[in-house]
Image (cartoon, rainbow, N blue to C red):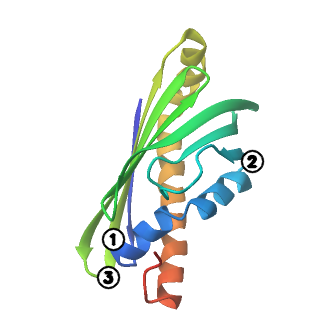
Amino acid sequence: MKLTARTEVAAPRPHVFSALSDIPALEEMARERGAEVTRLDDGRNGPAGAQWRLTVPLQGRPRAATARVAAYEPEDRIALDVEIEGIAAALELTLASPAPDRTLLGADVDIRARTLSGRLLVQPLKLARGNLEDRLRRRLEAFGARVAAGSAADPAPRS
């Protein structure tokens, strides 16, 4: 099952990528949504190669998950591979610059069941695909609004 969302952010591409690369802030956002997050790598390589063990709420139950940064191309894309109890998900975040002070942020998610129990988890998600894409788009827009608000206050990109 594939989900796609796009939004335009009123901030330059370096600012948006910097926010996407802010691992502690992203970990905190996951915790705010009910996930337990433990980073497995030492963080010396920054976001490239980062790995986590997570417990995430899915269909009313906490589910064990692992995640890792599969690709990290500064100012262009970040890809994550996630495994959740028989489900493999690939998330790709891409950036494009339609104008110097604007960034097009895209998210593509590919979810695949790897086991029978994974199929049982994915089937209800397939039925709610439109709702999931709408939620993904709204989360991207909220993220973009936070980045744009920070960009106006901080004219230099964070490293």
> Percent position (x, y) of residue 46?
49, 59
- Label 2, residues with CA under 10 Å away: few <14, some 14-19, many ≥20: few
Inspect the image, locate mark 1, and give the three-letter code of the amino acid beneath it: Thr
Q: What residue would you read off at disc 1?
A: 103
Nearest to N terminus: mark 2 or mark 1: 2
Label 2 residue SS: loop
Residue found 52% across the figure and 48% down from its top:
50
> Percent position (x, y) of residue 128?
53, 33
Q: Is residue 58 left or right of residue 18?
A: right
Q: What residue would you read off at disc 2?
A: 34
> Percent position (x, y) of residue 152?
48, 88
Q: Which mark is residue 120?
A: none
Residue found 53% across the figure and 90% down from its top:
153
Q: What residue would you read off at disc 3?
A: 101
In the picture, the quarter occupied by the N terminus is top left
Residue found 54% across the figure and 30% down from its top:
83
Farthest-out residue, left: 98
Viewer-side residue, 72 vs 118:
72
Quadrant location of residue 35? Answer: top right
Inspect the image, locate mark 3, and give the three-letter code of the amino acid beneath it: Asp
Label 1 residue SS: strand
Relative to 154, is 136 above or below?
above
Inspect the image, locate mark 2, and give the three-letter code of the amino acid beneath it: Gly
> Percent position (x, y) of residue 17?
41, 67
Viewer-side residue, 105 vs 130:
105
Label 2 to label 1: alpha-carbon separation:
29 Å
